[in-house]
Amino acid sequence: MWCPESRRVVEEVCKRVAEGVKGFREAANTVKGLVGGRATCIEDSGRELMKRGDLEECVEALESIDPEELRGDRFALELLFSMLFTYYRRLRIEDKMENLLKIYEKYLRDTPIYLHARAMWVEKSSIAPFEDRLLLAISYELKALELDPDYIGAQHKLADLVVQALEEGWTIGDCPRLEHRCVPRSLVAKCREYLRSMAYELGYPRAYYTLARYNIIEGNYAKAIELLSQAIRLEPANTKDYSFRLAEYYNTLLLARSLQRIERSIASLNRGIEEQYREMASRMAEKIEGYESRLLSFISIFTAIITIVFTFAFAVSSSQLSFTEALYLEIIMILSIITLIIILLSKLEGKRYNRERERQP
């Protein structure tokens, strides 16, 4: 409940409206002084109407009232319009929403109540492509909030429309004002504050739902699931459209949980790919090391052979050494080179053995 007086307003109206326009006017005048935060309390009266057991009878009586007979009584006109529009909107009776807007435009055109209702109808209509409708609906809500900055209904719908834009892929940018595909950072921040206040201070279930959708956009799936659980718990079960709202909450909850599972699966897959990459890199390193040791062995043997040949040839051709002395020198060099090759190969084999021990669990 946004407004403590709204239940009393609905009780008085539904008690007297069967008397026709006279009874409705008298009921409206009785509660007029009670209503504070005018637009918020008037709309909240429509929300309270949805909880009544005699809802259909009360709405039928409200529909029989000719608004022309209330001309000049702005409060009574706003109250009648808001109660009927809330009923049509929440039961998705769009043709009656449109007709009501046409009838009441001449009476309430510049009021926050009417601008807010206009925004909600534009959003659901087919008068233009969806993005154009979003821009138009947001402009209506901004005008309503200029006239009544504390209007909770307009605050929430503005936040809902901004979330819809972000769900459609619009970016949060440094654009000075709202435009196609760009939502100003300042507007997003303001809408988040609206939602937090309505959820945590007023316990408004729809605000929890809209805030959850914003968290899904940000990838905060666990937080979204928590917020949706709160919305489901707080939604009044005695309203006419309870099943509609609950279906929306559960569908979004399913989406959040599915996205959370997908995120976890991707993370697990990435870890598996990383482990496979490390294992493949390790095997490749082993093969390279094996090729390296063979190559070094071949180079060492080839170098030794060349050295032996040239040394022997030099020694034989030298006048300072005899053939026998040159042969002894060559044998010593061959033994030294063989010793160096054995030492080199043993060191390479030792490194391979140590690496294999480190890999063992």
Image (cartoon, grey):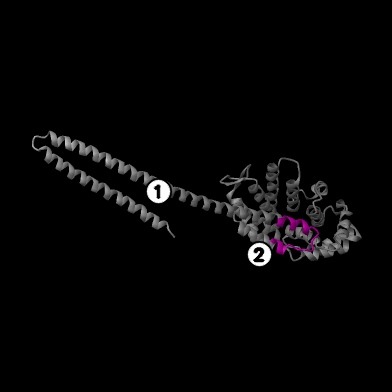
Quarter of the picture containing the C terminus is bottom left
Residue situated furthest right in the rendering: 19
Left of 329 or right of it: where is 110?
Answer: right
Left of 42 or right of it: where is 19?
Answer: right
| Amino acid type of the residue tagged 1 in the rendering | Glu
Q: Position of residue 296 (x, y in %)?
A: 31, 43
For numbered disc 1, what is the local secondary structure?
helix
Q: Quadrant of residue 320?
A: top left
Position of residue 51 relative to residue 184, above or below, is below
Asked whether residue 234 is drawn in magenta, I would say: yes
Q: Which stretch is magenta? A: 231-250
Residue drawn at (76%, 65%), measured in percent from left and top? 5
User: Along the line of sight, which residue is nearer the eye, 197 or 129?
Assistant: 129
Residue 201 bears which disc, if any? 2
Q: Quadrant of residue 332?
A: top left
Residue drawn at (79%, 51%), measured in percent from left and top? 92
| Amino acid type of the residue tagged 2 in the rendering | Glu
Residue situated furthest left in the rendering: 320
Q: Position of residue 109 (x, y in %)?
A: 77, 48
Residue drawn at (13%, 35%), measured in percent from left and top? 316
Left of 26 or right of it: where is 288?
Answer: left
